[in-house]
Amino acid sequence: MNYIIIGNSVAAVGAIRGIRKHDQKGNITVISREGHVAYGRPLISYLLGGLVTEKRMPYLPEDFYEKNGVNLLLNAELVGVDSARKSLSLATGETIKYDRLLIATGGDPFVPPIEGLAGKEKVFTFTTWDDAAKLKGIASDIDRVVIIGGGLIGLKAAEGLHLLDKKITIIELADRILSAAFDRPAGKIVAKKMKANGIDVLTEETVVRIEGEGAEITGVTLKSGDFIPCDTVIVAIGVRPACGFLKGSKVTVNRGIVVDDTMETSVKGVYAAGDVAEAKDFFTGQKNPLPIWPDAYIQGDIAGAAMAGAATSYTGGLAMNSIELFKVPTISMGITNPLEPKEYEILTYIDRENYQYRKIVLQGNLLAGAVLLGNVERAGIYAGLVREKVDVTPFKDQLLNPDFGFVHLPREIREALFAPQGKAA
């Protein structure tokens, strides 16, 4: 069997392991447009800021690819897929055949049309090792930075640049930063911490024009008419599934590559996993892209097993974000901002002075989501309660307790969720 994996991030790693669980002899080739082995993408802000070296970026053992019999092709750009002939076309003109194909190409940064952007040299995105390396390489020529977007990508870029003592302004269209994962109180707490570290945060604003002559940037003009001086702009609005090379193929693409519960696409023998895939949501069953690191690995593992002929099934993606900003750890999971609040019960605890916040979202007797700021040590317990759909009625009053943990769970729940091989916890 000839397995081809396009992309070399966490979904690909999951797929390699998934394949090797069931097929130790098949040929595996990984094709990556990047020039690096699999690395921790959340570390790129620390690479930029000098807290980690390039040697610490890879998270796999040096012999991972060799031990798993993987042929790794770096700096290789895929330009087309011919599913009828089961072949791939690379930018070099080379054609590669496959028996099973996994598309795990992740997402491409979305850069909207902004007046004045064309021709400007110091406009960057921030999603890859190379993005961080480029910024680090010109750090001595950077003084003031405007970051367009207050999501995870924008905040990590701000963190790295802050470590380099740059003046930073974040421009966010929503009424809070991290709007996809946080509510207003949580967003305000994180914004307060960032402001305490000298980072300006402007919400309900957007950049309408990048100012400057020729390649030079002098600042940005906002929707309100305000002018923010800067010499560098980072566009961190978000990513879109990287699947433009499928144009003309028979693989169904909506917002991402549509997959079934085995991660197989509309074309037999072609699979997709990670940020590029449009898979089932844990709560609704509806399909949508879910750019979440742990979920990408799970999808990759399921796809790899299915490619090797094993019976697997994806139970659905659970939105979960984890980020630490200026020593304030945060985790959000599940449904954090219900579209129909009347269907949910919401419990909250807040201590703004100490950057502490907890939000519990209940749907009936089930935990549907949670936001934790400051104290996140027991986040895994909450995630287990969500995924296993545990009736939380017996310990509902303890869910907001900063010390909530195993001791608050009834014995039978501890055994079901956490005891190895059914032994008592």
Image (cartoon, rainbow, N blue to C red):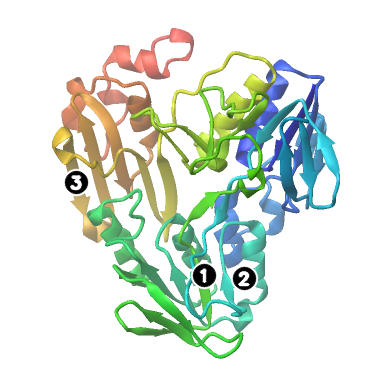
Circle 3 residues within 10 Å: few <14, some 14–19, many ≥20:
some
Circle 1 residues within 10 Å: few <14, some 14–19, many ≥20:
many
Per the model, the C-alpha gap separating discs 1 and 3 is 34 Å
* Lower sequence index among marks 1 and 3: 1
Q: Which residue appears at 61% of the width and 83% of the height?
A: 141
Please determine whether, in this image, residue 165 is positioned above or below residue 235: below
Determine whether label 1 and label 2 are within 8 Å by CB. yes
Please determine whether, in this image, residue 389 is positioned above or below residue 14: above
User: Which of the image's four quarters has the C terminus?
Assistant: top left
Total of numbered circles in the picture? 3
Q: Residue furthest front?
A: 248
Can you identify the residue that label 3 sits on?
349
Can you identify the residue that label 2 sits on?
135
Per the model, the C-alpha gap separating discs 3 and 2 is 39 Å
Please determine whether, in this image, residue 171 is positioned above or below residue 276: below
- Front tag of 1 and 3: 1
| Residue 125 percent location from the top left of the image | 56, 64
Can you identify the residue that label 1 sits on?
234
Viewer-closest of 49 and 115 = 115
Local secondary structure at mark 1:
strand
Residue 418 lies left or right of residue 259; in this view the side is left
Circle 2 residues within 10 Å: few <14, some 14–19, many ≥20:
many
Local secondary structure at mark 3:
strand
| Residue 252 percent location from the top left of the image | 56, 35
| Labelled disc at residue 130 | none
* Lower sequence index among marks 1 and 2: 2
Q: Which amino acid does label 2 sit on?
A: Leu
Q: Which residue appears at 67% of the width and 15% of the height?
A: 309
Local secondary structure at mark 2:
helix
Q: Which residue appears at 16% of the width and 30% of the height?
A: 397
